[in-house]
Amino acid sequence: MWTIRQDQAEAFRQHHLQKFEDEMVEHLKKFAPQHCRAAGEPAVRRVIRMGIENAGRYGFTNRGPVRFYIELMFMFGSYFDTDPQYPWATTALNDLTYRDQMRRADRLFRAMNRYGAQVRGPNNRHLIEALNLLSQTKAEEVANSTDSLEESAIQRLYAIYPETCNYLGEPALRGLVRDSFEIACSYGLTTVKGMLLMVAFTIFVGHRFPVDPLYPWIGKRLEAGRGSDPEARTEELHTKATLYLRHALAEKAKG
């Protein structure tokens, strides 16, 4: 009887994984061109491999559900599954009511659509407006407030992106702001501008933005020059973030 050795089976599996990865790279260049250009193909491939592995932890092994999981990473951050901003994702991914992958993926899809309609708006209208307001916000305006930095940041977030603030509720939002401040301090970015920049990254990029392979330019600049002048490092990060935001807004305007 003809049998397949373990090494042959593994080679067969790796061949199909590589083919899927190559197909996803081409798909994502159209699905999320800004991410792909900014991150570069090696990082995109890392995200795809990470997505295959993480999707498998939730029981997604078929082509369609895995592809959708990876798309969600590009839409909401590589660690969307554990991000406090997206409880709908955590709930749907951990709901084992249905064993069938397609039914579970469909439930996740419907949860995403409900969230999108409420928070991001038709054609991402609310998100685009929030990004435009963010691009016009100056840290000095927040710093000059008589309130604490935490209160000022929360008030500013409600002014910039009320849909996500109302969706999360103030306790969860306050928790994200405090977590952002801790991240800022851990990297020595203790200026007001540095701390507010970390809040913006958390809300608009994702809660694990320092290690998200989709945003290597953030992690690189956070790690570089630890202990050096926090103002200079913050300015460099802010300049890059502004450029990235400008390109993202231009792309969304075309789409």
Image: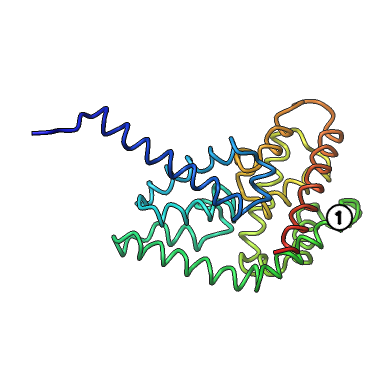
**19 relative to 142, above or below:** above
> Is 143 left, or right, of 164 in this rendering?
right
> Is 233 left, or right, of 119 in this rendering?
right
Q: Position of residue 252 (x, y in %)?
A: 72, 61
Q: Position of residue 52 (x, y in %)?
A: 43, 44
Residue depicted at x 90% and y 56%: 141
**253 relative to 84, above or below:** below
Q: Foreground: 220 or 194?
A: 220
Instruction: Label 1: state its secondary structure.
Output: helix
Q: Foreground: 204 or 32?
A: 32
Q: Foreground: 232 or 72?
A: 72
Q: How many numbered dots are placed on residues in this image?
A: 1
Indicate the quadrant containing the N terminus: top left, top right, bottom left or bottom right.
Answer: top left
Residue depicted at x 70% and y 32%: 220
Tell me the residue that label 1 is attached to. Answer: 142
The quarter holding residue 11 reads top left
Q: Foreground: 27 or 91?
A: 27
What colour scheme governs how the chains and residues are painted in the rendered image of this protein?
rainbow
**246 relative to 226, above or below:** below
Residue depicted at x 55% and y 59%: 86
Q: Which residue lies furthest to the front in this view?
A: 2
Q: Position of residue 58 (x, y in %)?
A: 38, 51
Indicate the quadrant containing the C terminus: top left, top right, bottom left or bottom right.
Answer: bottom right
In the rendered structure, which amino acid carries the disc numbered 1?
Val
The quarter holding residue 253 reads bottom right
Q: Where is residue 231 in the image (x, y as percent from the top left)?
A: 86, 36
